Every structure is written in structure tokens, then in C-alpha cells.
């Protein structure tokens, strides 16, 4: 798992954001965080091209709103907040719904295959089949959750963020995050039970 | 504890924040323990898959950085679909404003004509049809008739 951020770099970047960034500084921020932001978005939208576009939008929005960054949270948390908002806006946009439905299926199939190889190297065929079923089940169940539940679930279980970090990223109370998480876990648990 | 873990306690268990009673239950109840393990395994598989899928070659990250820099230099901050939303909203506002302006600057309505009742109008038309004389000569006709009646009265007192 990636470490959050090196303290001197973090401080220097916060200063830069507060004082107005030079293009070079901003490029450095993109370089440092683009992989994690892409992964967060990919876990929410399950589409490489879309996650790429939204990652670009995320950094452009961050650059546009750099004056609003007060340095009260980590830059990475701030970027994740922007990314989640973009993913939510995107999900609301019916304009893209048709394209998503067209593109989801092949991406999903590819995902299952690569996950299988990645998560269980050298395992038996039976084990691989079980793993494939589990991965597919979790992904399909996540699509049934509300956008907030899905975001909370992804940040907790895929990004391994603490409840406090999730609360900060999503601008929610920790109690609210817990409620979303409990509901998401219950829904996934119920779904997994029914699929057995 | 009544049977297996309820939803809230089970969620707490998989979130690694179990109370002592939940931890004890998981130690004693094989069914709940196995279910929690299966849940963790399924989620773990999904996480591993996402991490693996999100791995991209360095050329991908470089192209992404270049694209961000290019879009930033062009001032393209909003996603394409959002730009169209703004364009549509702006056009709609302009259209509404032009409609309002054209309504406000329209000519005043023509004055309402005082209409006669149907009966009065019909009577007027009938009188006009029966009369051989123009309207303006009617007083003279009345005067002549009066003079004729006076002359007849003098002849036959």
C-alpha cells in the first residue's frame, strides 16, 4: 500500500497551493498522486478510459480551485474528495449512462481475468473459479449501492483508509461514514449469502 | 447473545472494530466466523483485482500528465459534458431574456370600440334601408311636413 505523503514535500506543496502554484509545482503534484487518484476512480467506475478522463478532470479542478485549499487536510485527501465528487456527478449524468452500459461488460470480463491471476497465483483451478465468482459478486453488488455507500466501501476496503480519513475526504461526520459503511457491508453480505 | 451476530455487530466484526462480546462470539460460532472470513476473502480478492487493474505502464502516466498540462494551458477546466450543460443553459437564458424583452416592447393594444347592442344596430340598419333620404336632410323633411300640415289647417279651419 502506498504511504500517504512525505512530510517536507507535503508542507512545501501546501505552501505552494496557498501561495499560488507554478506550473512545475503542479506537475509534481500530478506526478505524486495520479496513480492513487486513478485507482480510486477506477474502483468507483470500473472503466479505464473513464477513470483516466476523470483523473484529468480531478487535477484540473484542483488547479482551478487551488486557492480554496486551506491546508487543513492532506493534499491527497483533498484530491480524493474532488475525485469522489466527480465520480458522483458523473454517475448522475444520464448523458453517459448509455456509454457506460456499453463499455462496462467487456471491461468487467477483463477485470475478472486479471484479478484472478493477480490475487491467486499458482492456485488450483477450483480455487480460481471460486475467486472469480467472489470478485464478480463483489463488483456486481457494489453497483447496487448508493454512490455514497459505494464510495465509503471502496475507500475503506480497497484503499484501506481509516474512518476519519474517509470522513475528511467525503466531508461527512465519522458517525455518518460508519452508518454508510454498515449499510454497505450489510448489503454486500446479504448479496453474497444469496449468491451462494 | 441471541443466535448469530446481528447486522451491526457483524459489520463491526468485519471492520475490525469488534467489541469483546463480538470477538467472543466469533471464537465460539463457526458459522459466523466462516462467513466473516468468506466476506473478507471476497473483498480482498476484489481489492487485489482493482489494484492490479489500476496498474498502468509508465507511458500511460506520462501521456496523462501531458494531457493534463495541455488542457490546463488551454484553460479547459470543466469536463466536456459539463461544458455543454453550460452552453445549453446559457442559450436557454438568452432565449428567455429575448422573449421577455420582446413582450415588454410590444405595441399597446388597440382601443376597445364601444359596440352597440345587436337590437339597436338592427333598428339603425332598418331605418337606413327604409329611408330614401340621406340622414342630413331629415330635419328639412320634418320642417316641410310641419309647414304642409299648417297650410292644410288654414285652408280647412
Image (tube, coloured by chain):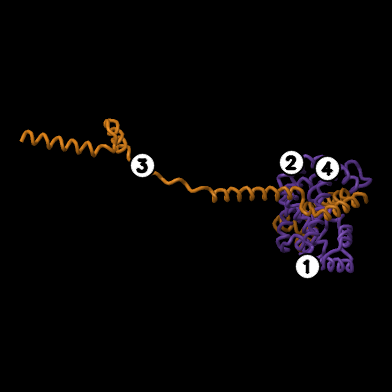
In front of the other: label 3 or label 2? 3
Q: Position of residue A11 (x, y in %)?
A: 86, 69
How far apart are labels 1 and 4 at the CA level? 38 Å
Please give the residue where the numbered disc 3 appears in the rendered image. Answer: B115
* C-beta proximity under 8 Å, tags 1 and 4: no
For the C terminus of chain A, the quadrant is top right
Labels 3, 2: one chain: no
How far apart are labels 1 and 3 at the CA level? 75 Å
Element type where label 3 sits in the image:
loop
How far apart are labels 2 and 4 at the CA level? 15 Å
Please give the residue where the numbered disc 1 appears in the rendered image. Answer: A70
Sequence-wise, the earlier of marks 1 and 2 is 1
Colour orange, chain: B
Please give the residue where the numbered disc 4 appears in the rendered image. Answer: A107
How far apart are labels 3 and 2 at the CA level? 63 Å
* Camera-side residue of B59 and B146: B146
* C-beta proximity under 8 Å, tags 3 and 4: no
In front of the other: label 2 or label 4? 2
* B129 shown above or below A143: above
Would you call the spot at circle 1 few (<14 residues within 10 Å), some (14-19), or many (20 or more)?
some
Element type where label 4 sits in the image:
helix
Sequence-wise, the earlier of marks 1 and 4 is 1
In front of the other: label 1 or label 2? 1
Labels 2, 4: one chain: yes
Please give the residue where the numbered disc 2 appears in the rendered image. Answer: A98
* Camera-side residue of A39 and B16: A39
Colour purple, chain: A
In front of the other: label 1 or label 3? 3
Would you call the spot at circle 2 few (<14 residues within 10 Å), some (14-19), or many (20 or more)?
few
How far apart are labels 3 and 4 at the CA level? 78 Å
Amino acid at each position: 500500500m502506498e504511504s500517504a505523503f512525505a512530510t517536507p514535500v507535503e508542507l512545501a506543496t501546501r505552501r505552494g497551493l496557498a501561495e499560488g502554484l507554478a506550473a512545475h509545482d503542479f506537475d509534481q503534484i500530478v506526478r505524486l498522486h495520479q496513480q492513487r487518484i486513478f485507482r480510486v476512480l477506477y474502483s468507483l467506475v470500473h472503466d479505464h478510459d473513464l477513470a483516466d478522463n476523470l483523473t484529468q478532470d480531478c487535477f484540473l479542478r484542483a488547479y482551478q480551485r487551488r486557492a480554496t485549499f486551506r491546508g487543513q487536510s492532506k493534499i491527497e485527501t483533498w484530491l480524493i474528495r474532488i475525485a469522489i465528487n466527480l465520480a458522483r456527478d458523473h454517475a448522475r449524468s444520464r448523458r453517459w449512462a448509455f456509454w457506460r452500459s456499453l463499455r462496462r461488460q467487456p471491461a468487467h470480463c477483463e477485470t475478472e481475468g486479471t484479478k484472478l491471476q493477480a490475487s491467486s497465483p499458482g492456485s488450483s483451478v477450483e480455487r480460481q473459479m471460486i475467486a472469480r465468482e467472489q470478485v464478480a459478486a463483489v463488483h456486481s453488488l457494489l453497483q447496487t449501492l448508493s454512490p455514497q455507500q459505494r464510495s465509503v466501501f471502496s475507500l475503506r476496503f480497497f484503499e484501506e483508509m481509516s474512518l476519519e480519513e474517509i470522513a475528511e475526504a467525503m466531508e461527512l461526520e465519522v458517525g455518518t461514514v460508519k452508518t454508510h459503511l454498515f449499510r454497505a457491508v450489510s448489503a454486500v453480505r446479504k448479496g453474497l449469502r444469496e449468491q451462494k | 447473545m441471541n443466535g448469530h451476530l446481528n447486522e451491526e455487530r457483524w459489520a463491526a466484526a468485519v471492520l475490525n472494530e469488534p467489541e469483546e462480546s463480538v470477538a467472543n462470539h466469533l471464537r465460539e460460532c463457526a458459522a459466523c466466523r466462516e462467513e466473516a472470513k468468506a466476506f473478507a476473502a471476497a473483498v480482498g480478492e476484489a481489492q487485489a483485482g482493482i489494484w492490479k487493474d489500476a496498474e498502468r505502464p509508465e507511458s500511460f502516466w506520462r501521456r496523462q500528465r501531458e494531457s493534463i498540462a495541455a488542457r490546463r494551458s488551454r484553460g479547459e477546466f470543466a469536463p466536456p459534458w459539463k461544458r455543454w450543460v453550460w452552453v445549453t443553459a446559457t442559450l436557454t437564458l438568452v432565449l428567455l431574456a429575448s422573449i421577455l424583452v420582446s413582450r415588454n416592447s410590444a405595441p399597446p393594444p388597440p382601443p376597445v370600440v364601444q359596440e352597440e347592442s345587436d337590437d339597436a344596430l338592427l333598428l339603425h340598419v332598418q331605418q337606413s334601408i327604409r329611408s330614401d333620404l340621406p340622414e342630413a336632410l331629415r330635419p328639412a323633411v320634418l320642417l316641410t311636413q310641419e309647414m304642409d300640415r299648417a297650410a292644410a289647417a288654414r285652408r280647412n279651419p
